[in-house]
Amino acid sequence: MKELIRIVSIMLKEKRDVLLSIIFGSIAGLTAVGLFAANGYLISQAALTPPLYILIGMVAVVKLGSLLRATSRYGERYYSHRATFTMLSDLRVHFFEKLEKMPLPDIQRYRSGDLLSRIVGDVESLQNFFLRVLYPPIIMVTVFIGTIMFVSFYTVEIVIILIIGLMLTGFLIPAWFAIKQRKLSGEILNTRANFSTETTEWFKGYRDLKIHRQLLEKEQQLISASDAYIEQQENLGKRSNINHSINLAVSFLIFWTVVAVSGYLVASGQLDGLFFAMVVMISLTLFDHSTPMATLPIYYEESERAAIRLESVIDSPKIKSKKQRGEGNFKNPPSITLEHVSFSFPGESREVIKDINLHFPSGSKTAIVGPSGSGKSTVLNLLLQLHDVTKGTIKYEDINLKDLDQEQLWKQAKVVLQENHFFAGTIRDNLLLEADFMTDEEIKQLLFDVQLSQFTPSTEVFENGENLSGGEKQRLAMARAIVKKGNIWLLDEPTSSLDSWTANRIYNELYRRATNDTVILVSHQLAGLEKMDQIVVMDQGKIVEVGNYEALMEKKGYFYKLKKIEENIISS
Ligand SMILES: Nc1ncnc2c1ncn2[C@@H]1O[C@H](COP(=O)(O)OP(=O)(O)OP(=O)(O)O)[C@@H](O)[C@H]1O
């Protein structure tokens, strides 16, 4: 319930449209009843052949009523739908903003298909909350109160029947449905999420599934997930129809009761026959406003579950507030210092970084090397604040990383990760992600510099760079880092898929472009590091050696041994 309250508070930002739709909806409902009442009265009057002016007056009232009803119905639809769509967009933005600030490991706990289902499906499910949960009871109560007050001028007996009808169709029967609904599994949102997860996994793993001949098995899982979702949708549809039919049947019973009792009242002289048709017509249209209450419990339940699913993702105590202090905009390349830094992944006791101290002077070039799994990439992720340190401090100049404006930091960091994402489009589109404007000539020169002269700015790039080789992706990522403005380079294995000749050219390009910048390069290849100011050697989350190439080779320690192993492998 508290999740739904929080969602409602976001929705109610659209107060004006909500209020207008309620006002127009109430006018539309009341005029509909009034119109039927006037018609009933007109029919009765016409039978008594009254003077023509009475008939003309009545016809004019009916026509005006129709006009008012049509206009207010239009206003109600317009404002209620506008409110709903704006609410949906507010909710989506709210969800994205929270998601954006979540620590990366927390987001990674979710499967991408499940997240997609929450962002798209669950947010969409909430559109029914205003239209089918909040709105119908308000309109129903307003229209019933207005009508009952009007009918009470003519007959108390019919008023009592209408109140009983309202209680039954508007409250008791929907309450009974709500109890029934609570007992049902209500798993449709989870089933939808499961279907979405299976579908994304099928697409992502298509090639591997095919090679490992698991495609048929995975397809079967996908079909079962789809069947389960379809079955639950059918059940929901059936339940909704049954509820609606039961409520409709009860309102017809009430209507016939009104007919019978009004007939009796007219026969016994307690009600003027002139009003018989009017009362009957009123009861015929009045219950149109209580029948939507039949499906309210279904939509309430669905909205509540959607709100819980959304809130469970974004209700993370670790969501960082965006700091707007502007710190992090370093005019000169900053120095970076790690003091007694340790790190464990959330929920894990193992420390993957163990009490390390490091200093990267301003404008220095550092390589972090070491065996696979030694924690090199983790250090880079910590510097980018993609993870928070468990112990210790990271400082840019003398500012604690935790106090830096994250956006500012990312804005000036030139980053190449082990896996880089490329968007469907052209080489130009992918490069201009990081630059405001580049002429085709500038792009061509850049492609030449990173050894990609086989491409033009308009060469097509498939989604996720599927039409590029591993090495081409790395060089394109490097080109993207080059065009980005900034003076901190954080590079994770940027040349691991390249032959040594091309890797050397890329390193030369890096040294040429980053003369005064602070560069931190993670690499498990030891070639080409001779020009680095310092080399940090890591093993099992610890720093085992620090020094420049010559010093480390002279020391004949860990780095020297790694270098010898690499040379032996290359020569054998
Ligand atoms: N999301 C994660 N959750 C839990 N443990 C992780 C996660 N990512 C990495 N690790 C673990 O952290 C340790 C350090 O990983 P890291 O990627 O930093 O190593 P690395 O030195 O960069 O390795 P490589 O050279 O293979 O890229 C590894 O033991 C790895 O299994």
Image (cartoon, helix red, strand yellow):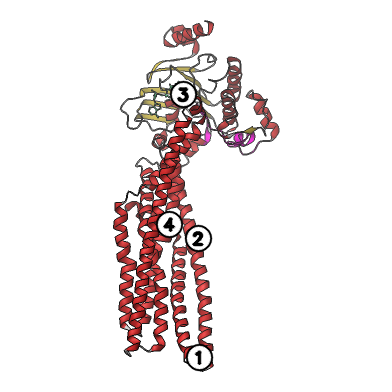
Q: Give residue 128's mark.
A: 4
x, y (%) of residue 169? 34, 67
Q: Give the spatial CA distance, label 4 vs label 1.
A: 45 Å
User: Which of pointers 4 and 2 lies earlier in the amino acid sequence?
Assistant: 2
Segment tinted magenta in the rendering: 411-438
| Alpha carbon separation for disc pair 4 and 2 | 13 Å
Q: Is residue 72 above or below residue 352?
A: below
Name the mark nearer the viewer: 4 or 2. 4
Q: Secondary structure at mark 2?
A: helix
Disc 2 to disc 3: CB gap under 8 Å: no
Query: How far from the left and from the top, in percent, is residue 251?
Result: 36, 70
Q: Amino acid at mark 4?
A: Asn
Mark drawn on residue 82: 2
The image quarter containing residue 171 is bottom left
Residue type at numbered disc 2: Arg
Eye-nearest disc, 2 or 3: 2
Q: Earlier in the sequence, mark 4 or mark 3?
A: 4
Q: Amino acid at mark 3?
A: Phe
Earlier along the polypeptide chain: callout 4 or callout 1?
A: 1
Q: Are marks 4 and 2 in contact (CB under 8 Å)?
A: no
Viewer-proximal residue among 52 and 413:
52
Identify the residue at image location x=52%, y=15%: 529
Q: Secondary structure at mark 3?
A: strand
Looking at the image, which residue sits at the far bottom?
51
Question: Which label's residue is closer to the chain start, 3 or 1?
Answer: 1
* Amino acid type at image mark 1: Ile
